Amino acid sequence: MPEILYQINPDRNVPWNNLPLLPVRKELYLTIEILEKLGDAKAALARLQGRSIVIPNQGLLINTISLQEAKISSAIENIFTTDDELYKAYSDQTNEINGASKEVLRYKEALWSGYNYLRNQDYFDIEYFIKVFQEIKQTKDEIRPDFLNTAIKQSGTGPTAGQVIYTPPKGQAIIKEKLDNLVTFLNDDENFKMDYLFKVAIAHYQFEAIHPFRDGNGRTGRVFNINYLTKKGLLDVPILFLSRYILDHKEDYYSGLSGVSQRGNWKDWLLFMLKAIEYTSMITFQKINEIVSAKDSILEFIKKDTRKVRSPEDLVNTLFTQPFTKVKHLVDSGIYSENTARDYLNRLCDLHVLEKKEIEGRHYYLNLELYRILSE
């Protein structure tokens, strides 16, 4: 009788309490094709890391790119907001924000909350996942209680809509056992030696299969992806558009997850994740170059204008930390007085660098080039 390398889920309608613990047998995924794609993904990610490190003001990337990652990851969960609504909400940062924009901003905060949590300690733990989840959902809820019946069902309106496609483990003791195994796998690089990109892909699947929370597991798992890459030094700051690839290949993403639980198909799952890392590293690299090029070009343009601007570098850096700027931003940062800030922003509108917008009685100044780059 052939050896069973991975015990698949025998019944998708019954809680998968026997979800195999990590690690995964290498025979299930280690092929020439996988190793070649690993090399491609590592090269693309290393190029992105090298580019981001040499940028003097990483605030250019931190706000703009992580905000887009938050928007895209939320869209995977059918939480949609327009760029204008999101950038306005981020610019305002008030308690008046509601709806989809608020959900997206919570994701961004969770991304940074997880990043800072891991900077303050040398390991992952269950508390890390709980804190990220709580930030996303703005709740004090923790691991699913024993009485809760949770099943993942087919979405949409087709003939299979509403059918159960997966039932995660049930019971807090079992869920905690699986999570304990997951964090041990993440932290112990001596006993679980493998490339970090293999490890993040395997861990992402395992977290989604455990499905420890009532809701928000998908977004928590995608925050983890980026936090893991920064924790392991593969990224300096969380600036990867990883959710872009998942959104564009949403069916393949969910098919890959199901392929592991139903057929033990780890090879296709790892190929998907490695392709996602490679592709999104490339497009993030391109966007960084476009942002930096646009910033430098606008700075040079302002310096050549006959009407001199005081502290042009500080002004342009502020304009590129988010698409919508307000007079208040320049005043609060201590760069200019209110009158000077308003005069300079209006002058940049005359030069077609910015576009003035009035929304709900408030004035915003849209950085046209930054908006274009992020929207493409």
Image (cartoon, grey):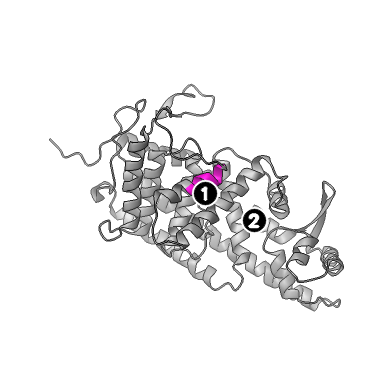
Residue at x-position 50% and y-position 55%: 280
Q: Residue furthest top?
A: 159
Q: Position of residue 319 (x, y in %)?
A: 72, 64
Q: In this orientation, which residue lies closer to the viewer: 240 or 249?
A: 240
Residue at x-position 27% and y-position 47%: 24
Q: Is residue 161 left or right of residue 174?
A: right
Q: Is residue 324 left or right of residue 173?
A: right
- Decide whether residue 14 is among the magenta residues: no
Residue 74 badge: none
Res. 271 visible in picture: no
Q: Within 10 angstroms of label 2, few (less than 14), some, or many (20 or more) residues?
A: some
Amino acid carrying label 1: it is Ser
Q: Is residue 181 left or right of residue 68?
A: left
Amino acid carrying label 2: it is Leu
Q: In this orientation, which residue lies closer to the viewer: 287 or 202?
A: 202
Q: Position of residue 298 (x, y in %)?
A: 73, 70
* Residue 173 found in image quarter: top left
Q: Which residue is mark 1?
A: 243
Q: Within 10 angstroms of label 1, few (less than 14), some, or many (20 or more) residues?
A: many
Magenta stretch secondary structure, dominant: helix
**Magenta residues, as a range?**
131-137
Q: Residue furthest front?
A: 140
Does 172 sit above or below residue 296?
Answer: above
Under circle 2, the secondary element is helix
Q: Position of residue 40 (x, y in %)?
A: 40, 60
- Dot placed on the residue nearer the N-terminal end, 1 or 2: 1
Q: Position of residue 299 (x, y in %)?
A: 73, 73
Residue at x-position 37% and y-position 61%: 39
Does 38 sit above or below residue 221?
Answer: below
